[in-house]
Image (cartoon, helix red, strand yellow):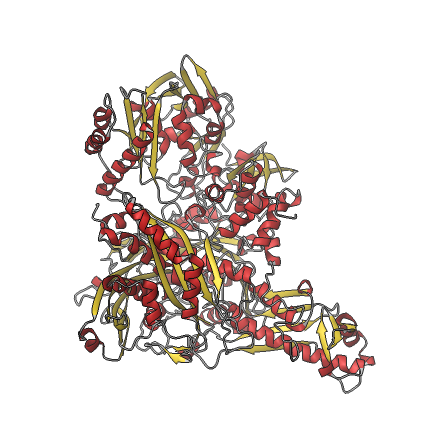
Amino acid sequence: MSKMQSVSLTVNGEAVTATVSVRKHLVDFLREDLGLTGSHVGCEHGVCGACTLEVNGAMVRGCLMLAVQADGATVTTVEGLADSGRSDAIRAAFAERNALQCGYCTPGMLASALEYVEAGGTADRDAIRAHLSGNYCRCTGYQSIVEAISDVISGEVDA
Amino acid sequence: MTGPLTIFDKPNSYIGKTVPRPDARRLAEGRGRFVDDKQLPRMVHAAFLRSPYAHAKITKLDASDAATSAGVVAVFTGADLVPHVEPYVGVLTHLAGLRSPPQHPIAVDRVRWQGEPVAMVVATSRAAAEDAAEKIIVDYEELPALTDPEAALAPDAPRLHAEFDSNLAWERTVDVGDVDAAFQLDGVTTVEREFRFGRHTGVTLEARTALAEYDPAEDRLTFHYSGQAPHMMQFIFAKHLGLPEENVRIVAEDVGGSFGIKIHTYGDEVATAAAAKLLKRPVKFVADRNESFVSDIHARDHIIRARMAVTGEGMIAALEFDDITGIGPYSMYPRTSAIEANQVLNLTGAPYEIENYRARARVVFQNKNMMCQYRAVGHPIAMAVCDGLLEDAAAAIGMDPVEMRRRNLMGDDSYPRASAAGMKLDDLSHHKAIVKLTELMGYDALRDDQAKLRDAGVYRGIGFCSMVEVTNPSPMFYGVGGAPIASQDGATVRLDAGGGLQIASSVTEQGQGTNTILAQIAAGVFGVDIDRVRVKTGDTEATPYGGGTWASRGAGIGGEAMLQAAVALKDQVLEVAAAILQSSPDKLDIRDGHVTDLDGAERMSLMDLARTVYYRGNELPPDLKPELIATRHYRVTEFPFVFTNGAMAAHVEVDTETGIVRVLDFWAVEDCGRVLNPLLVDEQIRGGVVQGIGGALFEECLYSEDGQMLNASMADYLVPMAAEMPDIHVAHIETPTKTSVLGAKGAGEAGTGGAPAAVMNAVNDALRPLGASIWQMPMTPERVLKALGVV
Amino acid sequence: MKAPDFDYHRAETLEAALALMAEEDAFALAGGQSLMPMMNLRLTAPEALVDLNAVDGLAGVRIEDQRLTIGAMTRYAALEASGEVAEHAPLVSTALPYIAHPAIRNRGTIGGSCALADPAAEMPALLLALGAEVHLQNVKGARSVAADEFFLGLYETAREDDELVVAIQLPVASKRQRIGFHEITRRHGDYAMAGCAIVATEDLSEVRIAFFAVSDRAVRARAAEAALAGTSGGKAELENAVAALSEIDFAGDMNASTHTKRHLAGVALRRAWAEVMA
């Protein structure tokens, strides 16, 4: 049994075919093989949320999925969310509220925030905080992130 | 308005304005430039085998299987690096008596903490390096692990270092006034408590990351660094790897959080640089999360017995404490591991009028990971001890804790002056801060609610902290003791041919917004739109020389240097403009990218001026030698530190059945002098408060008795997350420091320094009607239940 | 850390997956939300993985003969969104938001949680309280094990190495079923310090109580059930039930001693019972 396998998937709208080591997780594949360094590795055990990205329409932990499992999948990273304009409003709100400092949690935080907003989440601060409970940010204190998301939901952002 | 406009009120000043960070937009698009994002030709990856024991002799180390494992380029043991790396010693001469043995990047024959590097594997991938590391055979002879610092001080305790006569690394005492007499005064009430502060650590989301490349032709090391102090690291790599200092380049682009974690000399990073030099190819090391927990410096770990005497009028008669702190097996290089204890002695009681003050600190070697400076060094301990005792005493004599503070806080008009421990203080506003705080929080109404809820069996508490923060340090912090740590910083401002500014500074950006602050100052003081300013920081080859970012100094020191450089460039540009316009510099100004008359009428654009200078010098008078670049350096001279002050309050609810503490609300009034950018300062305060809440309620590096860290994962080490954190209300008092034109003090550590005391006081306020109290952090559910006598 | 190497097999049919489980010393890869962290931390090093994510027919919820059948590969997010689960297994719907975080629930599966048998996980205790049956299959055939007989110890179940959990079956809840769920956590979505799930008939004639995060496995509290079943469920009976929790073999951890676990279990029971009686 080969420890390498071929995968074909769509990443940020582009078709990608590659041969990957079966043990490589999805984030390492995106970062190292495709140069999509926007997704970050924070803990590699699924707790910090830094690697959160979209696979087949669902936000998942990129470190808890093998690259080979993404064969046939549609993957969207923080770069793709920006390029397509899908994250325009949330990014504008994050900048306006200073909802990021070092920016390391931001790709995962944006993914989780976008999942909440796109699912029709309310501007209720506790509900926003609960939804973000799996995304660690060491810098901000979270309040600005909550406010940025709330701003987007309330339509208070010009993107 | 009279007189000419100043840099603070001219129409295009950005100082004091909310300016969003340009970096934020880039980072949100996934365009960060973190060290691990970089891949270099021929790059290889390092992994470390680390000691599974807290204390052991290495009796055998066989790496032959590892050396032939797939993808392996090299294996290095501690002995392999001995000829190539000069050992380092973490002592400073101004901390008299501090001792620590020489340290090697990889253990040579004895391991002294679980997690100490034992061997390094370099391979074509990190996975291959880890596979090989598992194949290294090491035999250990286990030795007794000294984990409890009190036990390590016992006369018959085994010694961690044979060359020393005990496990004591350093001791300091302070004795001011007549403490014994004060405790004997008639009518004083004495409260006495034992405080315990657990170890916690920084948990930067981006782990420590190093990428070293070496060019043998030029004998040149380039180190891509996720850290805070490029020039300090330049010195360290040069000295310990035997390179000329100018041949070492340190580059720090985006840094995924640091908080003091990334400003020390780590063996794995030194080994990475050494390996790059020996292998003559780029070597990358990225700490994984488990390695972070067992090798990133830890902080706190203090046991303090303390007592305070107060008079019937609520005046503090005396304060005394004894601090024992465990620092791991070595004093960290180059900043040392004695600074936190030193700060505890310096800062405890510093907001208050205290005449009788005695304190002792003992800094002890032990077999745990090393302890060193992490955000708000010593502050949370100093503030919790003094303000904890103060509120305890207030309750004992039946006085409101705010009133107690009003009676004891140093008067806002009493500066300049010194604290009991001899700290020179100026420009502080404790009374204004606590008045503003009680207004902000609606103190009286909260107390009413608290009383009503208690009748309903709901235990809420309100706790305060009046605090100081050490910022903008002078050379008296480190340089005086022989450390390669600059307290001065430099700034360069250059007018380019397009009319925009290129600026560079030796302070660094870790997300706090330094680059934006620097651009605000340069743009505002010089007179261009902020969009016309490009900022360069974090590169020893491209910036002036300076200390980097630590001790909340980036804005205050780096910002003042930038202000001075911008003023200098403006003077230079106006001299040129005057020559071209046949005017005189004192009749001209620069606004919005143009040279103007004093009334604002535009005379020529900066682009025209710059192009004239750069391309058509023939149009200038021959004796005019224009310089469109200026560099200035700045250091604090009159004071060892520029102190800030603040007042904070926490509102908590204690679930007396589960022991879980919920922070309902938090308020912080901070005086960091001139606020340069409220958006950035407020979120610095909030982030700091959240780290403080983490230390107070959640975060602790748990060790077994034999020195194994038990919770070295993010599933088990609890960092504060969004759902548990309160909204944090921030307000400011602005008392500019007189030490600079800019007037800015630091703000980066106040929240972390003050929040734990406020939360602890709030918890004790909640528990008081139940006759319980807790003096140990973090205040975990089990500890709260124990305090309540439930378990 | 990076996972040690392994062979990877992506099964597309149940038969293929079972054949691979029979041939290889393999671990089944379901949602991967527990297995992948353990591999990334090098706490486990399977020779081979059999990925069930592409297997047809293993996911989904259906009602048959008053039984709610949940395919093993049904993800928590799908359970959360399922109207059938909300109607026929309200305890599961109530508990789901407390299980980890949205991104984890988007991948994590009911079968994976069941097969792993983490003592702190919610799902095994829910299955105990609900009287679920675990459907297992290997190349030789299929069998069904009651949840009460399935969870045997710390990460230990009645599943044989070559068997796969293929489905979970629950009795459909009566409209008047009473439920209670409470967990004590320091942070939202964390593994609990103690948790309790209760299912009772409307008249309290039958009461099933299960705990998680207090012992080496999810456990039924039968003496506590007996103390409450057939009573009015008042304060005195509840305190009898709390006292009866000494039947549980409590296991402490680094954050809570055995004694503290015992105390917290009582708190969780009282709070979950308050929901039952609400």
Residue under the point 49% across and 78% down: B636
| Picture layout, residue B712 above or below residue B535 | above
* Percent coordinates x, y for residue B377 in the rendering: 39, 66
- As rendered, which of C271 and B470 lies closer to the eye? C271
For this view, does B672 lie left or right of residue B564? left
Q: Is residue C148 left or right of residue B554?
A: left
- Tell me the residue at 48%/81% (across/down): B637
View extreme (right): residue: B619
- Expressed as whole percent of the image width and height from the top left, the position of residue C139 reads 41, 18
Q: Nearer the viewer, residue C128 or C179?
A: C179
Observer-nearest of B306 and B47:
B306
The x and y percentages for residue C120 are 33, 36
Q: Quadrant of residue B457?
A: top left
Q: What percent of the width, then of the height, locates residue B762?
A: 33, 56
Which residue extends farthest top?
Answer: C65
- Pick out the residue farthest to the bottom: B623
Residue A104 in sight in this render? yes
Answer left or right for C214 relative to B475: left
Q: Is residue B414 above or below residue B256?
A: below
- Against B421, residue B157 (above or below) is above
In the figure, residue B599 lies in which quadrant?
bottom right
In which quarter of the view is residue A111 placed? top right
Asked if one can make out residue C218 in the rendered structure from this viewpoint, the answer is no
